[in-house]
Amino acid sequence: MSFDLTEEQESLRRTVEKFAEKELAPIAAEAEEKGEFHREIFEKLADIGLLGIPCPEQYGGAGLDYSTYILVIEEIAKQCLATAVGLAVQGLPQIMINLFGSEEQKKQYLAPLASGKKLGAFALTEAGAGSDAASLKTTATLDGDSYVLNGSKVFITHGGVADIYLVMAKTNPGEGARGISSFIVEDGTPGFSCGKTEKKMGMRASPTREIILEDCRIPRKNLVGKEGDGFKIAMIALDSGRITIGAAAVGVAQAAFDESVKYAKQREQFGQPIASFQAIQFMLADMGTAIRAARNMVREAAYLKDKGKPFSHVAAMAKLFATDTAMKVTTDAVQIFGGYGYMQDYPVERLMRAAKVTQIVEGTNQIQRMVIARHLLK
Amino acid sequence: MKIIVLMKQVPDTETKIQVKPGETAISTDGVTFVINPYDEFAIEEALRIKEAKGGDVTLITLGWDKAAEALRTGLAMGADKAVHLNDPAFLTNDAHSIALALSKTLKKLQYDLILCGKQAIDYDNHQIGVRVAEMLGIPHVAVVTKLVLEDGKAVAHREIEGGTEVVETPLPAIITCQKGLNEPRYASLKGIMQAKKKPLEAKKVADVDASPGEVGQAGAKTVVLTLTMPPDRAAGKVVEGEPEDAARQVVKLLREEAKVI
Ligand SMILES: Cc1cc2nc3c(=O)[nH]c(=O)nc-3n(C[C@H](O)[C@H](O)[C@H](O)COP(=O)(O)OP(=O)(O)OC[C@H]3O[C@@H](n4cnc5c(N)ncnc54)[C@H](O)[C@@H]3O)c2cc1C
């Protein structure tokens, strides 16, 4: 593993940086305030081929590795976490269908997801089953050539705007994790509907919504993998998802850091720039150091995954460290801005609210610590 | 249709320009480089013409080793091949020398249309497109905001003080591009991955049939004597008090001190 990016990676990083500065930066604050989802941004991302990064070329994607994917996510997250998380969520069903789906499923679903014609979503969490995902209650009952799904999922990113949902449901309610299977459910299927759209603290340009399944009948061939594979599939998806959330958190932290350096040089108190005070300098030094460590951890996790080596504990460490770093760095950024940091006229309060959610999604940071400790003690 | 785009790598528009004392070129320390924004309009226009009418797009730049990055970016946007005049003996900021090297290169190539930016945003000479057209003995239209190609000719709309001039020219011709001509695309992921496989040819002075004395610094017709930063802007003045009094005070200052009204 080299610390240098390849020529293509650097070129891609710069392209995405420019895209994010021109297309996302001007609308991010307003979209956040109004809680507006911008579908057209995903069309623009699709135009330059960014929605199918992890999908193999033969199915219409770019077939790129995670080491490249995380560069894109970090650059997007610097301007808009909602878009970065959307990009990561779009990747999840692609990764899972590619790994476990039938040839027919790959042909039918991968190209529209990779090209952005359809948006994807990942539906695991339920009101009663968050960290303890295996206790989910949604059922899928085989009936002739169909499965009939019943239950509801909460907090689904892109719920209501997505076209293709990967839904985890129990085919064997008597069992725990091993009773769970994974299904493709298309928007518009009778019995599929959306409930409440959540009002969130941050990342408000990304819709988070309940989805409801009432006698929702889907073709039997929409089962992904075998019956009972669902939990395994979901956990593999989360392992990969953690790397992307880590990358997004690094982007949020970097953005807050860049703003802080700029502000500290320019804000004067006691007749000098606040950057000349050691208290501020040390804060910046700690912020810069933590961001660098976090980025390198995320890169290592991506590297291990790309090489086909065991990576799940490193992904958990990277997610834990990068998102805790984002929280700490954005909080300190608000501090460096003083009262102005608390105001919506400056971007750091938005970044601080954004950072919080990264500590919760794709497994809370308490769950990451459990995953890590289990690995260390085995 | 064979289209050639002349392009330059320049400091990013957000660069804080610095000049070291005694130097006659801006400092490149810590500077990120991009394609000259006006040349991006030229590349975009070339790609749109190619997409509509077929043909190919060749990029040409004169510059140091690093300028190859700008060519790769242009290839990633969709151009087909690139030529890099990469020889220390080419390097100069003199418009005549650069135009001569480019025109010598162009004489050995086939083209129906040549596009370039109206100016490069680093030294702002505004001269290359026009000079190259003269040297090649072909027409040019400068500062173009709309371009329509019909067989064998081009109709170009150009910005002039207070209006638009519509000019028709036979081809081949040189068009220098202005903001408003189009909205340049982003390089696509696929384009970036393919760019490395596209031909990028480096040329030395001898390869374009130039003699070392006529191009680069040796062939320069101008000499930069000094390069200095503009003086720091003086701090603003805040006039306090009741709006009415303050306004009166501001008018007085504008008239007596600033002498602008
Ligand atoms: C904005 C947003 C978007 C989301 N998008 C999606 C999505 O697209 N798809 C999806 O399926 N889900 C999604 N989620 C759900 C998310 O994955 C869950 O919120 C998360 O897993 C936590 O579950 P919970 O909210 O039920 O919290 P709980 O599990 O109830 O946790 C509450 C607290 O208890 C702690 N805790 C729980 N168990 C333990 C334990 N064993 N040991 C120690 N501490 C423990 C937790 O760490 C937490 O601090 C999203 C959530 C948010 C906020």
Image: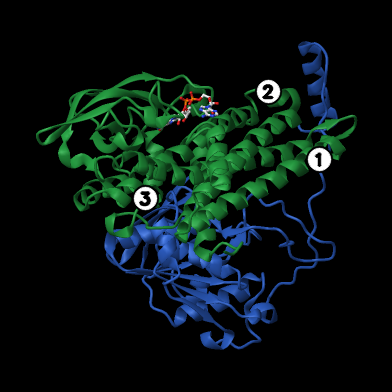
Provide residue B53's location: percent of width, then percent of height: 28, 62
Residue underneath mark 2? A342
In which quarter of the view is residue A86 placed? top left
Query: Who's the residue at 45% across and 81% down the image?
Result: B107
Crowding near the residue tagged with mark 3, few <14, some 14–19, many ≥20 C-alpha atoms within 10 Å: many
Task: Label 1: state its secondary structure.
Answer: helix
Crowding near the residue tagged with mark 2, few <14, some 14–19, many ≥20 C-alpha atoms within 10 Å: some
Query: Which amino acid type corresponds to the residue marked 3 in the rendered image?
Result: Gly
Provide residue A252's location: percent of width, then percent of height: 59, 39
* Subunit bearing disc 1: A
In which quarter of the view is residue B221 placed? bottom right
Depth order, front residue of A360/B48: A360
Q: Colour of chain B?
A: blue
For discs 1 and 2, the disc positioned in front in the rendered view: 1
Query: Who's the residue at 61% across and 52% down the image?
Result: A296
* As drawn, A262 above or below A149: below
| Label disc, if present, on residue A282 of the rendered structure | 1
| Label disc, if present, on residue B48 of the rendered structure | none
Q: Measure the C-alpha gap from mark 3 to mark 1.
A: 41 Å
